Image (spheres, rainbow, N blue to C red):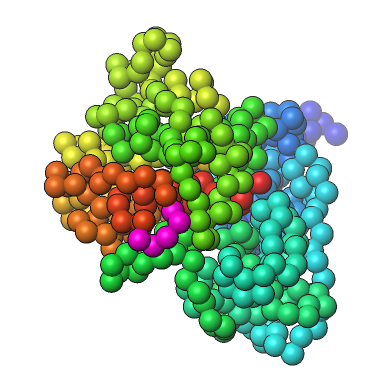
């Protein structure tokens, strides 16, 4: 072959390779895409944080997904490398892609519990499955915490859903060889399918009392978990976050000795009725309830918690914001964000930008953010609460809708200044005791911590 012909062949090969590289990998890869939501991240040579870094990706970049782990916790992008799925947003049917590894770090795939035949099983088109997310929980004979415990279910088990309670808080599952009905808390697991397609069954004793003529929402109606919480939490544990600590990021409604502090002193609170199960969460996070967070202080706003000028110079480093300082000092696994009362001087855009920065800071470090709405409406038209709810849905992270919890109280549980809450002790034994904004704030905040903690374990 002459030198000129060899050059032509080489050029043709180069062109062929370039064209091949530009062709989509497969139809499935074209149909499923991954959008990077963090500022930047590394693709790795395998589905593990210990695998070598092979490529850098950046915010808002979009890549075709070409493979996945069995639990969808890691995704292969364009056959280049692997990324932790919680770092971005997936569009398309990821379950249609090939499974290229068991799970992240080659962990075994949880086995599902078999379902026994039942005449009451819904039609195949309306099938809904429930997978347990908490370490373990009890199935009860009726949709109520006061109903007898009939079975134990464990993390990773999957059951067919037969019915739901009227408020959607409970799901009836088809437990194998069951001799009685089996009801579980819906938020303690994940649901595949449309829960609205299964029938409503059985009486539903409300677990929460009433205040005056208004109905106080049950936990399931004021707390939503999002689908990313467990992945964020597990990543956080891998980088050293403490599963027994949470942090408070907020203003005067989030400071010690008022917010959650009573739960660190057994003589300062009483749990009654459906709330006794919250004691396990109190034990797990002992010490965090009364701890003074450097990211929670009178006057803090969505801007000041990010400003190093507002940091506590006694414990924070030069140039460190209150949020960054709090993370370094505490290394929490969860963080309750409750800001907005002192942000009325901000525009909606500035308030939202500040919240986004806080959320992203926590996500980058594997801390599960629990966004809280507020009882007041100082900014008018509920604008800040709308932003909070929208961001929780956009980032797919937990939301504690405190505003909904107190809407049945006189003046939404607020004093005459319309932004401080009416004080009340942490006594939750009877409906007559639950009349103040602070009682409902501390109770529903504890319920939010409990729901998220059980879901991520």
Apparent side of residue 456 relative to residue 114 in the rendered image (left or right): left
- In this picture, is 314 found above or below 234? above
Q: Residue furthest right?
A: 1
Q: Tell me what residue is drawn at x 69 percent, y 58 percent.
A: 137
Q: Residue 183: give x, y in percent of width and height.
A: 64, 72
Q: Residue furthest bottom?
A: 119
**Closer-to-camera residue (407/304):** 407
**Closer-to-camera residue (315/3):** 315
User: Which image quarter is the N terminus in?
Assistant: top right
- In this picture, is 273 found above or below 368? below
Range covered by the magenta-colored residues: 428-432
Apparent side of residue 134 relative to residue 117 in the rendered image (left or right): left
Q: Residue 276: give x, y in percent of width and height.
A: 56, 54
Q: Residue 27: give x, y in percent of width and height.
A: 66, 61
Rendering quarter of residue 187 = bottom right
Report whether residue 376 is seen.
Answer: no
Rendering quarter of residue 148 = bottom right
Report whether residue 178 is seen.
Answer: yes
Q: Tell me what residue is drawn at x 53 percent, y 81 percent.
A: 203
């Amino acid at each position: 072959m002459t030198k000129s012909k060899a050059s032509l062949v080489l050029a043709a090969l180069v062109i062929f390779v370039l064209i091949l590289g530009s062709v989509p990998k497969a139809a499935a890869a074209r149909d499923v895409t991954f959008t990077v939501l963090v500022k930047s991240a590394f693709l790795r040579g395998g589905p593990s944080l210990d695998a070598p870094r092979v490529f850098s990706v950046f915010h808002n970049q979009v890549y075709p997904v070409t493979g996945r782990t069995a639990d969808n916790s890691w995704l292969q992008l364009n056959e280049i490398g692997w990324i932790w799925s919680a770092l971005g947003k997936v569009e398309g049917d990821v379950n249609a892609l090939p499974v290229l590894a068991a799970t992240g770090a080659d962990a075994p795939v949880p086995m599902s519990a078999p379902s026994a035949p039942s005449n009451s099983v819904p039609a195949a088109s309306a099938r809904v499955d429930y997978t347990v997310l908490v370490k373990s929980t009890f199935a009860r004979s009726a949709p109520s915490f006061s109903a007898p415990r009939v079975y134990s279910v464990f993390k990773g088990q999957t059951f067919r859903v037969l019915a739901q309670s009227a408020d959607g808080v409970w799901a009836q599952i088809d437990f194998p060889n069951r001799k009685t009905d089996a009801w579980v808390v819906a938020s303690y697991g994940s649901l595949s399918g449309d829960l609205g397609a299964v029938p409503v069954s059985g009486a539903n004793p409300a677990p929460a009392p009433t205040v005056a003529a208004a109905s106080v929402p049950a936990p399931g109606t004021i707390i939503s978990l999002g689908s990313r919480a467990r992945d964020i939490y597990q990543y956080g544990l891998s980088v050293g976050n403490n599963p027994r600590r949470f942090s408070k990021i907020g203003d005067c409604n989030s400071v010690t000795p008022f917010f959650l502090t009573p739960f660190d002193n057994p003589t300062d609170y009483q749990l009654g009725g459906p709330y006794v199960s919250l004691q396990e969460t109190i034990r797990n996070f002992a010490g965090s309830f009364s701890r003074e967070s450097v990211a929670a202080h009178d006057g803090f706003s969505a801007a000041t918690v990010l400003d190093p000028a507002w940091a506590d110079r006694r414990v924070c480093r030069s140039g460190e914001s209150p949020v960054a300082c709090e993370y370094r000092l505490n290394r929490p696994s969860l963080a309750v964000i409750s800001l907005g009362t002192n942000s009325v001087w901000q525009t909606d855009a500035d308030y939202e930008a500040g919240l986004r920065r806080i959320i992203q800071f926590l996500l980058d470090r594997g801390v599960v953010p629990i966004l809280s709405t507020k009882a007041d409406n100082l900014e008018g038209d509920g604008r800040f609460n709308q932003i909070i709810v929208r961001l929780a849905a956009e980032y797919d992270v937990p939301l504690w809708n405190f505003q909904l919890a107190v809407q049945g109280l006189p003046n939404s549980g607020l004093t005459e200044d319309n932004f401080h809450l009416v004080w009340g002790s942490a006594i939750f034994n009877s409906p007559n005791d639950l009349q103040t904004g602070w009682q409902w704030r501390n109770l529903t905040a504890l319920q939010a911590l409990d729901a998220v903690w059980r879901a991520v374990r």
